[in-house]
């Protein structure tokens, strides 16, 4: 079935975080929600069909991840990322954030230093601080119209003895798809100072036209041996509620340590029957759907870019390379952050992600989720125009 991304699907009353929690999050039930990172599109039909088929059998007891489950992940990495991985390298993780938390637990101790690169996806801070590790900020720097890694500062932070660097590749919220050169340099520096790279690559399939994703661990065996990668079909195919992700770890020593937490200490390596079915169907049969999705998202990005440059000159966009989350600078409006949020919620009727939650550098920015029907995005942009010019 050809996907129709223009269709508006009412997600209210499905316990949708994005649609059913607006009163708690924004103080108003009726905002147009363009915040949390899921899409307002149905998942691929092949996934629905696979789940229906599994439902024909009425027993849902304990199960093993099948060989086909692992093969589907290996095939996806080969076809989409030119990355050859082995079956043994794959460890199940229910979510990417829970995987990051387990990696922090496995590879550092309370009091150890962990590097993050703000502004960055806010759970990066929680998994460090709530496990009593110490955050070191290697703030991204602005070069012209995009964010870059400050390598000189990174080396200073590494010299302080950081045990782990939490890498966001591609980067949420700034929309960078890090280049091979960036990753090589970062990987070599981390090796030099014996700092493990934990690479969150959950957005790796959502790369905009003209860019490519480089898996950190595809950059040779030394860097791979010092990297733990997390990927998932959850952002790619809108399956976050299935809670099925994968850690990919080529280094057997690191893998054993990670599994010691996920399989033995916490016992979260099972997952759920439908998560496995959905992952396998998406990774084996979802490619045409993903290509159509990427066309649509590129169209949404072009629409937004064009609208902002012609109708909303007071807002600033950055060069956007990856993810369906667009980072927008509202600082020219000269508003304090809470006044900006109040204006957007109460004058424009929009529920966006507040930049300040992403840490230093996020002030006076907003993150807009463009994974919605074009007509919804048009409504949102016109509401912004009415309130911000
Ligand atoms: C960079 C990044 N990592 C992880 C997640 C969430 O992953 P999960 O729901 O699998 O924990 C998100 C969701 O927005 C994200 O942007």
Image (tube, rainbow, N blue to C red):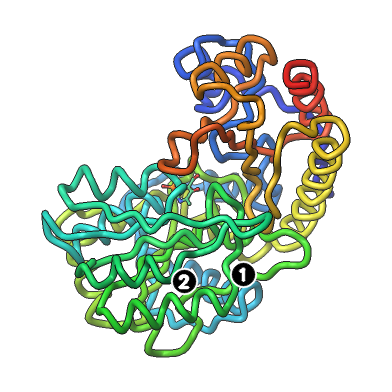
Please name the residue that numbered disc 1 is placed on.
213
Query: In terms of sequence position, does the residue under pointer 1 or pointer 2 come before the other?
Result: 2
Front tag of 1 and 2 = 1
Q: Is residue 188 visible to us here?
A: yes
Q: Residue at x 38, y 58 (%)?
A: 138
Helix, strand or loop at mark 1: loop
Q: Position of residue 312 (x, y in %)?
A: 80, 31
Taking depth in this image into account, of 112 and 224 the one nearest to the observer is 112
Q: Position of residue 25 (x, y in %)?
A: 47, 19
Please tell me whether residue 111 is drawn above or below residue 229 in the rendered image. Answer: above
Q: Quadrant of residue 286?
A: bottom right
Answer with left or right where residue 137 lies relative to residue 262. right
Q: Residue at x 52, y 30 (%)?
A: 354
Please name the residue that numbered disc 2 is placed on.
70
Answer with left or right where residue 85 lies relative to residue 102. right
Pointer 2 local density, CA inside 10 Å: few below 14, some 14–19, many at least 20: many
Q: Residue at x 67, y 34 (%)?
A: 40
């Amino acid at each position: 079935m050809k996907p129709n991304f223009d269709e508006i699907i009412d997600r209210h009353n499905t316990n949708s975080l994005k649609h059913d929690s607006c009163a708690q999050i924004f103080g108003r039930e009726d905002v147009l929600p363009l915040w949390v990172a899921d899409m307002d599109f149905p998942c691929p039909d092949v996934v629905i069909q696979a789940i229906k088929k599994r439902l024909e059998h009425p027993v849902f007891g304990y199960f093993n991840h099948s060989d086909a489950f692992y093969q589907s992940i290996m095939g996806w990495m080969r076809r989409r990322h030119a990355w050859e991985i082995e079956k043994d390298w794959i460890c199940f993780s229910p979510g990417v954030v829970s995987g990051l938390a387990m990696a922090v637990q496995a590879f550092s101790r309370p009091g150890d230093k962990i590097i993050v690169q703000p502004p960055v996806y806010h759970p990066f801070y929680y998994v460090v601080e709530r496990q009593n590790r110490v955050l070191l900020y290697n703030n991204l720097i602005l070069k012209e119209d995009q964010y870059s890694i400050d390598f000189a500062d990174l080396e200073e932070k590494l010299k302080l003895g950081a045990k782990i660097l939490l890498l966001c590749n591609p980067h949420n919220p700034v929309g960078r798809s890090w280049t091979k050169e960036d990753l090589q340099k970062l990987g070599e520096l981390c090796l030099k100072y014996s700092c493990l790279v934990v690479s969150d690559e959950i957005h790796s399939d959502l790369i905009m036209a003209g860019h490519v994703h480089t898996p950190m661990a595809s950059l040779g065996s030394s860097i791979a041996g010092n990297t733990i990668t997390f990927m998932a079909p959850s952002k790619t195919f809108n399956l976050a509620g299935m809670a099925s992700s994968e850690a990919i770890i080529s280094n057997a020593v690191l893998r054993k340590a990670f599994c010691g937490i996920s399989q033995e200490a916490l016992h979260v390596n099972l997952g759920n029957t439908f998560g496995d079915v959905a992952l396998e169907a998406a990774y084996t049969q979802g490619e045409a759907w993903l290509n159509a999705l990427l066309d649509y998202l590129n169209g949404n990005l072009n629409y937004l870019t064009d609208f902002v440059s012609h109708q909303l000159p007071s807002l600033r966009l950055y060069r956007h390379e990856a993810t369906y989350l667009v980072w927008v600078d509202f600082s020219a409006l000269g508003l304090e952050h809470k006044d900006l949020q109040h204006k957007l919620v109460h004058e424009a009727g929009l529920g966006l992600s507040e930049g300040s939650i992403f840490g230093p550098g996020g002030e006076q920015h907003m993150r807009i989720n463009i994974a919605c029907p074009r007509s919804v995005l048009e409504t949102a942009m016109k509401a912004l125009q009415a309130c911000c010019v």
